[in-house]
Amino acid sequence: MMKDVSLSDVAFSKKSWFLFFVFLFIFSFSLSNCAKKIPQAELDAAKQALERAKSVGADKLEEYKTAEKYYNDAQSLVKEKKYDEAKTKAIVSKEFAELAIKRWQEELERRRKEEAQAPKEKVEIQEEELTYGKPELPVLKGINPNDIEGTSTLGRGYILKQLRKIYFDFDSYSLTDKAKSDIEYNVGILKKILEENPNVSVLIEGHCDERGSNEYNLELGWKRAQAIKRYVELLGIPEDRIQTVSFGEEFPEDPCPPPQCNDESKWSKNRRGVFVITVK
Amino acid sequence: MLKVFFLLLGIISLEQEEKLIIDITSPKYKPVKVILESSKDTSSISEMIKRNLKVIGYVELVESSPDVLLSLSKEGDFFVLKGFFGKGKDPIFILRAKSESPTAIADALSNQIISKITGLKVDIFGRKLFFLSNEEGKKEIYSMDFLSGKREKFIQAKSFIPFFSVSPDASKIALVHFNGKEYSLYIADSSTKKLYTTSIKFGMFLSPYFSDNDNLIIPWNDGKGANIYVLNLKEKSFKKITSGNSDVMGKITPDGKSLIFVSGRLGLPQIFVKDLKNGRESVLPLSGNYNTSPDISPDGKKIVFSKLEGNRFSIYIYDFDRSEERPIITNFGSAENPTWTPDGNFIIFSSNIDGDYDLYITDQYGNFKNKIFDTQKDETMGFLK
């Protein structure tokens, strides 16, 4: 016999369903509350690990760059309120940063052992006067004499008006987009010159502004010249037609010795790479 | 009243200790006022002594009311210098000197006067000052008897000389010269001026430093970046001791155990210490992000160095025992390339506060900053040997 379903039974069932949905709502809410929490501790840990890695010099390694990328991703995800994913990225970032530190320490240890085992190379010491090999400046074919701006630093070669100077940021030897564009322009001109004049080479001078020490700036000038040279080779000029030299801060184009002179427009002119046509 | 009282205190301490002392570490120290009296046969030496004393800021030459009266006379073959307190009748010290060279006498007495006044062992007069000057339009090495004022060109450049170092006994000079393509290393015999070079004919040498008379610490960029090497002139060996590929200057401590070097391996230049036994390297805990040009004190306990602050250099001292740094020259143009005098009491540095770079002398507290000589050209990198 079928049991008659009373109104009270139906009411209980509805109540159950109501309670069930209330419970479901509360459960979902509590879950979503967990996901709404910014993973600050993980982000801070990742940031500290990146800073530690940078302070010991590990920022040159690929592991560091990966750590940095994950950290930046984590920050973007936080902005999008995707906190779980951000947390994961931050944790991975920290691990990569720590891996970078470990790898760097292993590299330093390897270098230490190498230095300790490095043989003393023998050198000869002979009497010799100071020399300065100033080259005979080439006669250039296919160049209008009016295009020659003048001779370069210490008379190593010719500076042509149409060749652009390459400029750098402070303490940097990275090529900016403008620098690359100017090098590309110069290479277009140089290829013709080098083809018509097999006896000449391109000399790239690296210069610095007057801030900083002479030793560091001589090395920085070298890095700038090398950066330009690498790009010039990439654009198709063979290595044996390119020479480089650094003059550090010794020959500023627009002297501005600090602190009497405090003019960034002058300093920026001095942080330059110069293309010179010289003998091969 | 206070000043007199202080002087009286000084007299009391002098009678007990029988030596003149001013507290050069006190920020309130004042130079000792001195009158130097001389006779006709001592006047030229007296003038040389006065010239010497003017350079050291512990003494102020006055016309009247001295703290100390110096009296220079000749007794037989000896030049006798007596020091009196103010109007005192009994000398507080007597110095006797004999030499065929009046300059040598003046230098020896000058050293002794400063020693008596300060309690330091002073030994700077009578030495030779080497420096770079662009007097003839290019950087070349000059020398001068400190402080005769007579400068002579020591090494003539064909192009220019950016760096050099003098051996402790001043018998050799290492220099870097741009030969048209590379920065080559040369060693000059100081007495014959003969030049020697090595068989390393490529790359770029940077700032050399004689750690002793036979070992030269030299950064060399072989085309991959600068690292520091030791060139032993007796064994004729060349050994790499750092691998940062951005190591631009190095000096070995007097005990031979550590290398102090400058590297851009972390970005802008910082000063590092390397234990030469176990190879471990660490960066000195200095403030700021650009520290360079260290020079180690003769006792190995401190370094003097340049710190880039804003767009100018200041000079600081780092004390290894206390692990702390302190400024000694700030807001004085751009103060660069500091070096210790061999007695460890003074520091020679260059500054462009007057427009061109000149050489100055100070002490390790920055108590004074006195120009050594003046030209309208740039003088840098002064070494007293």
Image: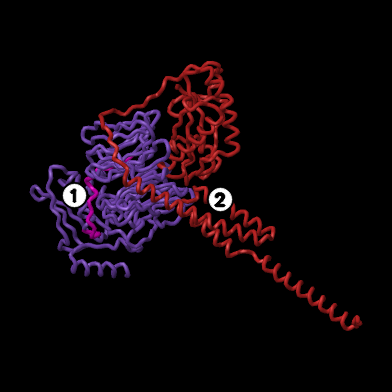
* Residue under the image location 57 percent in, 31 percent down: A183
Characterize the local packing of mark 2: few (<14), some (14-19) or many (20 or more) Cα atoms within 10 angstroms.
Answer: some
Residue topped by disc 2: A66
- Vertical position of residue B257 compared to residue B356: above or below: below
Q: Amino acid at mark 2?
A: Thr
Q: Which residues are magenta?
A: B116-131
Return the residue nearer the eye: B117 or A36.
Answer: A36
Quadrant that contains the N terminus of chain B:
bottom left
Q: Find residue B16 and report its horizontal and vertical position in percent.
A: 18, 69
Model colouring: by chain
Q: Find residue A105 and report its horizontal and vertical position in percent.
A: 43, 53
Which chain is displayed in red in the rendered image?
A
Q: Chain of mark 2?
A: A
Secondary structure under tag 2 reads helix
- Can residue B130 be seen? no
- Vertical position of residue B372 compared to residue B20: above or below: above
Per the rendering, the mark at residue B361 is: none
Q: Amino acid at mark 1?
A: Ala
Return the residue nearer the eye: B59 or B142.
Answer: B142
- Asked whether B121 falls inside the magenta stretch, the response is yes
Q: Chain of mark 1?
A: B
Return the residue nearer the eye: B212 or A262.
Answer: B212
* Residue under the image location 39 percent in, 46 percent down: B351
- Can residue B225 be seen? yes
Which chain is displayed in purple in the rendered image?
B
Distance (Cα) linking label 1 and label 2: 66 Å
- Asked whether B53 falls inside the magenta stretch, the response is no
Q: Find residue A75 and report its horizontal and vertical position in percent.
A: 63, 57
Which residue ends up furthest to the left in the rendered image?
B76
Per the rendering, the mark at residue B108 is: 1
